[in-house]
Amino acid sequence: MKTVGILGGMGSMATVDLFSKIIKHTQVTCDQDHLHIIIDNYAEIPDRTHYILHKEHNPLYKMIEAAKRLESAGADILLMPCNTAHFFYEDLEKEIGIPIIHMMRETKKAVEGSLMLFATEGTYAADLYKGVLYPDKEIQTKITELIYDYKQHGKINDKTKASILKQITHVDGIILGCTELPLIFNQEDTCIPLIDPTEILARKAVKSAGAKLKEAT
């Protein structure tokens, strides 16, 4: 089986979430059936959205540093549990000799219909999920508040979350296009299907690494 490298720290809880979901989706009968996973939780990587919006503190250099470190440690494939980081995908890919699984592409392959995107301002500005619906600016601002409240304080404002979901209608699904958002929103919060790119990435990683994928129950 191939060794999986996780370029983490963007943010740290999202990194834990991806690792957990890879474990959850791997079919095993003993400890030794799990994948070899190397995690570099490099929290020093500057904020991706801040760079996209203001062109200050380019995170690419530290992303390259971490990716090369993972490659040197033996990773055969690379994962980035940060949607906005995929703005740098092509530049990062040029610097290493192992493939990076592209979270947006895998998500777009897995879903269809009229989809609303919840994401960071950087992901919206860079149009990283093409062909999806964006919420209005008021809702985008509330989503940003939820994301950074969670990143900075580990808090979830249930009132803000409810007010966002109340305004979303007539869509086939909501893409939780920031890796903190699956930690904030639960399917119990809404009757609209919630699409978790981290889950899709985890399942793709299991298959790409050659492990057995646990079927959904």
Image: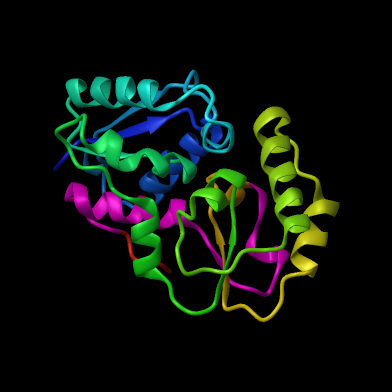
Closer to the camera in the image, 104 or 4: 104
Residue 130 position (above or below residue 94): below
Judge from the rendering whether residue 111 lies leftward or rightward of residue 134; answer left or right: left
Q: Report the span colored magenta.
A: 184-213
Q: Is residue 172 above or below residue 177?
A: below
Circle count: 0
Asked where in the image residue 214 lies, by quadrant, the reply is: bottom left
Image-quadrant location for residue 118: bottom right
In front: 207, or 119?
119
Residue 57 part of the magenta-drawn span = no
Image: 45 above or below 189: above
Image location (x, y in percent) of residue 48:
51, 34
Residue 41 horizontal/vertical position (percent) = 43, 24
Front residue of this view, candidates 215 and 10: 10
Q: Can the viewer see residue 136 in this picture?
A: yes
Q: What is the quadrant of the N terminus in the image?
A: top left
Residue 171 located left or right of residue 205 = right
- Near-viewer residue (102 or 19): 102
